Image: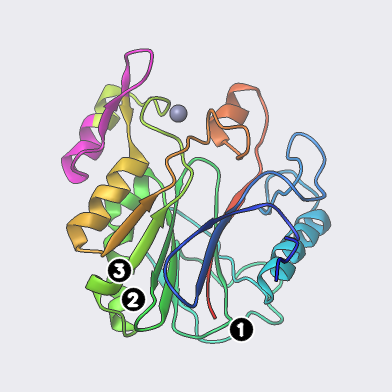
Amino acid sequence: MVRTPVIPVIEVDLGPGIRAFFTTRDGGLSGPPRGTLNLGLNVQDDDEVVLANRDLVDVEVGAKVSYLTQVHGTVVQVVDRAAVGVERSRGTADASVTAVPLVPLGVLVADCVPVLLADPVHRVGAVVHAGRAGLAAGVVATTVGAMVDAGATVSTIRSAVGPAVCGECYEVPQALQDAVSDVVPGVRATTSWGTPSLDLPGAVARELRRLGVAEVVEVATCTRTDARFFSHREATANGEVTGRFAGVVVLS
Ligand SMILES: [Zn+2]
């Protein structure tokens, strides 16, 4: 049976019985400049419109997605029940883990790295918001550890590193590049115009492989230059506040 999608999504294969995808800018109700599928609250969009956009994602998944109040930290929330009645946020955290079927987990981004994880053998899923600060603080390894605590084994975890600002675009001051490189191996990069930068998606993929995760799918598209996605840096350069797109994982 061919089902007509409610919204455009980029599906990734994390194994049997797992659905994982990224949303794009398209398919929602927000006006410019946050058109149209903005899923982020507090970005100068109308809350009712954002919640209606989130409803579209819920319909696409078939259950209410749990979102977090993300603060670039390393707290992992263990989600053990459906998000029914949760209007805006499951709480303050930058990753969530569940072993409960049909409880979708969502992560919101616009240049930071969305990471989707699932162990299709032991039935554990997770999402991570991995920006510069969270990555440096260890949010990826902390989340994999929380998955193991929930019953996963590292050698059967599969992962996807989603759309994020790339090393050719993410310019940072030399001192910041030095500081992050001290704690995140392989993150050092150079912009296309020859200045210091950070390759966050590359560093996340390297970290997942270092941890022993079985599979790392790299979507490998840049939010700054790929107009399908919201980009904080691109919007800021244009004097605008950008929206957020999502990565979602659900166990069937
Ligand atoms: Zn780029």
**Which residue is painted at 51% across and 66% down in the image?**
92
* Type of amino acid under label 3: Val
Query: Splitting the image into 4 quarters, where does residue 145 fall?
Result: bottom left
Number of residues whose C-alpha sits closer than 10 Å to that of mark 2, classed few (under 14), some (14–19) or many (20 or more)? many
Query: How many numbered circles are shown?
Result: 3
Task: Work out how far the residue at label 3 is from the one at label 2, CA to CA, in angstroms.
Answer: 5 Å
Q: Position of residue 10 (x, y in %)?
A: 57, 52
Q: Position of residue 251 (x, y in %)?
A: 51, 78
* Type of amino acid under label 2: Met
Mark carried by residue 144? 3
Q: Position of residue 8 (x, y in %)?
A: 69, 52
Query: Element type at marker 1?
Result: loop
**Position above or below: 180 against 168:** below
Q: Which residues are magenta?
A: 178-196
**Position above or below: 236 against 145:** above
Which mark sits nearer the N-terminus, 1 or 2? 1
The scheme the figure's colours follow is: rainbow
Mark carried by residue 147? 2
Residue 65 shown in magenta: no
Residues marked 3 and 2 touching at CB (< 8 Å): yes
Which mark sits nearer the N-terminus, 3 or 1? 1
